[in-house]
Structures are given as structure tokens and as C-alpha cells.
Image (cartoon, rainbow, N blue to C red):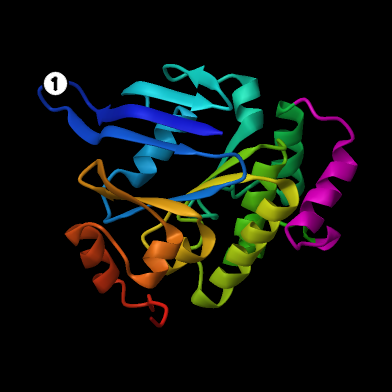
Amino acid sequence: MLKIENLDVWFGDPPDRVHAVRDATFSVATGESYGLVGESGSGKSTILRAITGLARGWSGRIEVGGEAVSGGHRSRNFHRSVQMVFQDPYASLHPRHSVDRVLSETLRLQGMDGIDGRITRLLEAVGLGRGFRFRYPHQLSGGQRQRVAIARALAAEPRLLLLDEPTSALDVSVQAEILNLLSDLRRERGLTYVMVSHDLAVVAHMCDRLAVMREGRIVEEMKAASLRSGRVGTAYAGELLAASGSYRREAG
């Protein structure tokens, strides 16, 4: 579903150019959930932004569904295949747009018909009833706002979802609800995920494989089962594991 080869991403112009990602290479199979972990500033979210065209300065090769993307422009077909869920659901929703407007505008942009019925089905898919349709973001809890953001991403009927710290801005009590929702949606809709997170427990639970990033480079790639059992191949990954206070390794 996704193939990244020799990806470099930078910001600014020489001599002040900053390289955020260097020579990143990985691939994600259809239906797989793939994690990107590392310290803040390691380049995880920058990779997602390069895929979507939000980061314009990049070189290398990005393929989605076997089709290469180039430059900063992304076609309508690309946005029907690839959608992103951002970290802060309040910042990613327009404060003066109702849930109905958020979803109906997205559906119209994607050329969908039967919008009224689609909105109802989207709200049901993310665990929100019809009563939420005409509410505004300030009338919703953080978890409800993130459910709306997920519904907006699903409106295009994508195959690949890019998840940028989708639960880190939420209360601990609702993080599990959103993660369980994402797991259910992936299974029911055959979705492919690329998830950025600083929380190793989240990645170990949600992902099949993951890449560990440090200072813009991928330093290790492993199966999530290896992370869960504490079998890591680099000292840096071991340091991340040790520093993750909420993470508990499996016995044995």
C-alpha cells in the first residue's frame, strides 16, 4: 500500500536549511498497521506530512498503491486513498463549523452523493448518534471531537490512514476507547495504518511492525511482538523502552 524509498525532508533554504528526515526507507503492506516511534523531533510526523504534501521540501520516492507521488501537489484520487488524523482534534476542526458542515463539505469535495445518509452512517461508524450532527466542536468532549475527525477522514472511503499521535491530546480515560475504535475500523474496512506515537505501549498494541527513528533517520525496524517482549536490536531502542514508564513488557 505504501512504499518509501530514500526519503529526505527539509525545511528552509541554504545556509539555514534544516534536514528533518534523512534517507528513510520502509514499506507497509495492504491491511497492515505500521508504527513510527522516537523522541520528539526525530522526524516521525514529518514523514506523514511529506506523504500528504504538507511538507513541500523532499526528495526520494513515495508510492501509494503502486503509484508514485511527486512534489507538493496531490490529486483527488490521492486524497480519496489517503487521509490523515491529526493529534489535536480541537485544532483540526473549524470552531464555527458544525459536525454536519464538516462532514458534508468533505463529502462534497470528494464528489460523493447521498450525503445525508452518508453522514448518518459515518457518525454511527465512529460511535456517535444523530444527536451529534448539528453540534459544534466546543460542545463536544475531546474524545467526541476525535471521533468526528476520524469520521471526516473516513468520508473519502480511504484505503490508508495516517495517524499522527491520535490519542496523545486526550484524557487517559478515553484514549483506550479511541484506540479500540481505530482497531475495529481497520478490521471492518480493511484499512492500512501508519501511526506516529511516542507511546510504545500504544504502538505495541496497535501495530504489526514499527520503525524506530533518531535524529531524522530510521535506526531499527522490528515486529511489534519483539517490542512487546523487549527484544530490541539497538541500544537506542532499548533506551526508549526503558524510558517509557507506562510500558510493561510481557512476562518471559
Quarter-of-image position of residue 132: bottom right
Q: Is residue 43 left or right of residue 64?
A: left
- Which residue occupies the foreground of this view, 120 or 222? 222
Residue at x-position 25% and y-position 29%:
11
- Left or right of residue 21: residue 235: left
Residue at 58% from the left image edge and 27% from the top image edge: 65
Quarter of the view holding residue 136:
bottom right
Residue 61 coordinates in the image, percent (x, y) = 39, 22
Quadrant of the frame with the C terminus: bottom left
- Residue 157 lies, with reference to residue 99, above or below; the image says above
- Residue 4: x and y in percent read 41, 31
Identify the residue shown where x is 55% and y is 78%: 173
Residue at image position (31%, 35%) is 24
Prevailing secondary structure of the magenta residues: helix
Q: Position of residue 40 (x, y in %)?
A: 27, 54
Per the image, label 1 sits on a secondary structure element best described as loop
Please report the bounds of the magenta region as a residue range: 111-131
**Rendered location of residue 197, percent (x, y):** 41, 57
Q: Is residue 125 left or right of residue 199?
A: right
119 is within the stretch colored magenta? yes
- Looking at the image, residue 68 lies above or below residue 4: above
Residue 70 vs 7, above or below: the answer is above
The amino acid on which the numbered mark 1 sits, given as a three-letter code, is: Pro
Neighbourhood count class around disc 1 (C-alpha, 10 Å): few under 14, some 14–19, many 20 upward: few
- Count of numbered labels shown in the rendering: 1
Q: Is residue 134 visible?
A: no
Comparing 236 with 142, the one in front is 236
* Residue, far bottom: 251
Q: Is residue 28 magenta?
A: no
**Badge 1 is on which residue?**
14
Q: Nearer the viewer, residue 211 or 111?
A: 211
